Amino acid sequence: MIDFRLTEDHLAVEKMVREFAAREIAPRIKELDEKGETDPTILRKMGELGILGICIPEEYGGAGFDYIALGLACEELEYVDTAFRVPMSVHVGLNSLTLLTWGTEEQKQRYLVPQAKGEKLATYALTEPNAGSDVVGMQATAIRDGDHYILNGEKVWISLADIADHFLVFAWTDLEKKKVRDHSGISAFILERGMPGLTTGTIHGKLGIRAGNTGWISMQDVRVPKENLLGYEGEGFKIAMFALDQGRYTVAAGATGLIRACRDASVRYALERRTFGKLIGEHQLVKEMLAEMEADYQICRLLWLRAGWMKNMGLRNTRETSLAKWIATVASERAASNAVQIYGAYGYSNEYPVERFYRNCKGAVIYEGTREIHKLIQADYLLGFRTDKPLRCTLPPWEPKPERESVR
């Protein structure tokens, strides 16, 4: 039997995050968006409520909920604004869940625990000025020097770059493999703000998600202890892809929340605005756009819920998560465009939130795998060019993991 009902815990999480977003984010988001500033106090409050560690086990400082709870939190946060869903992707999905799966006990105690409690913010640094979808095009290097690695390189378009405390960074440790673009020469490292040679900055002038911090990271001879190597040398690409399975899931759930926000705003306006002597909601072409939003919302919610269920079961879900991310982000772009169309000239003004929704939605169609990358992923599965091999430690977060030794 398939049961589509949410549990009492899920409903409680949904209600808690919805009320938090309405109370703490909604009253300030227009001002923050206009100024292009984030508000760290909101992030601290998210940490205090356990939102930033929502699906991390209690033994590591988290709230101990499951992946469905994580998805619900993302949907509710992006219903108000994308900027405060983004930390759920980079801090929770890309970083914390990756540390939970691949980290040693020492690494978990030092980095994961304060992250799950919201005491420290964390991010994920894969993209470079000349390497986005082409991961093996990265130029960052990490050269072993006794008990340390020396990291050099640049990362860009990194969410929370200028406010994060911890950084999950990827770099080449095997320069011979770098020459032939063999991704088994890439490794993953945990860096801390304050390490000599590590600097960050903020990118200004973004189209959307202006209330969120996005920036760059520069590494100039940064000495990183070998204990900060995540996994083993050469596992960086696998770790990066594992992380993306978590991050893409949060993006899919968040984009679904944006569709719902566009739908609800459009319905309200369609029941208020009158043209040609009647409510615009009575015009057939407006009804068509509203119906499309509703269909997209229901489809995308089912897609991310299926991916979340598979994660809860410990099943490999790269294909399903990719599909959910692709369909939800493209549908959110369509919903936002239609919402602006329904509002007409007012939709072009920041007097109404649909203008912000329209600017925000575009980022998700690009980051964590462009729509084109996800189309290729889906086609490769159909053609048999791609198959899922089991990844180590794909159990849900509340299941015990086999312990890993420290490096090496």
Image (cartoon, rainbow, N blue to C red):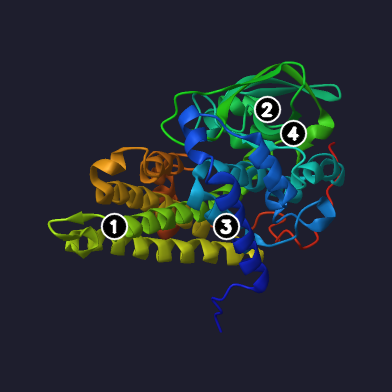
Q: Looking at this view, is 187 or 68 the one in front?
A: 68
Where residue 118 sits, quadrant-wise, is: top right
Q: Residue 330 at x, y = what percent?
A: 37, 50
Q: Residue 392 at x, y = what percent?
A: 71, 54
Where residue 274 sits, quadrant-wise, is: bottom left
> How crowded is the residue under tag 3: few (<14 C-alpha within 10 Å), some, or many (20+)?
many
Q: Nearer the viewer, mark 4 or mark 2?
A: 4
Considering only order in the chain, which callout, 1 or 4, is on the residue closer to the N terminus?
4
The residue positioned farthest toward the bottom in the image shown: 1
CB under 8 Å between callouts 3 and 1?
A: no
Distance Cα–Cα, label 3 vs label 2: 47 Å
Label 3 sits on a secondary structure element that is: helix
Q: Is residue 134 visible?
A: no
Q: Nearer the viewer, mark 3 or mark 1?
A: 1
Residue depicted at x 78% and y 44%: 112
Label 2 sits on a secondary structure element that is: loop
Q: Residue 381 at x, y = what percent?
A: 45, 57
Residue beneath disc 3: 18
Residue beneath disc 4: 190
Considering only order in the chain, which callout, 1 or 3, is on the residue closer to the N terminus?
3
Residue beneath disc 1: 272
Q: Nearer the viewer, mark 4 or mark 3?
A: 3
Q: Looking at this view, is 178 or 118 the one in front?
A: 118
Mark identifier at residue 174: 2
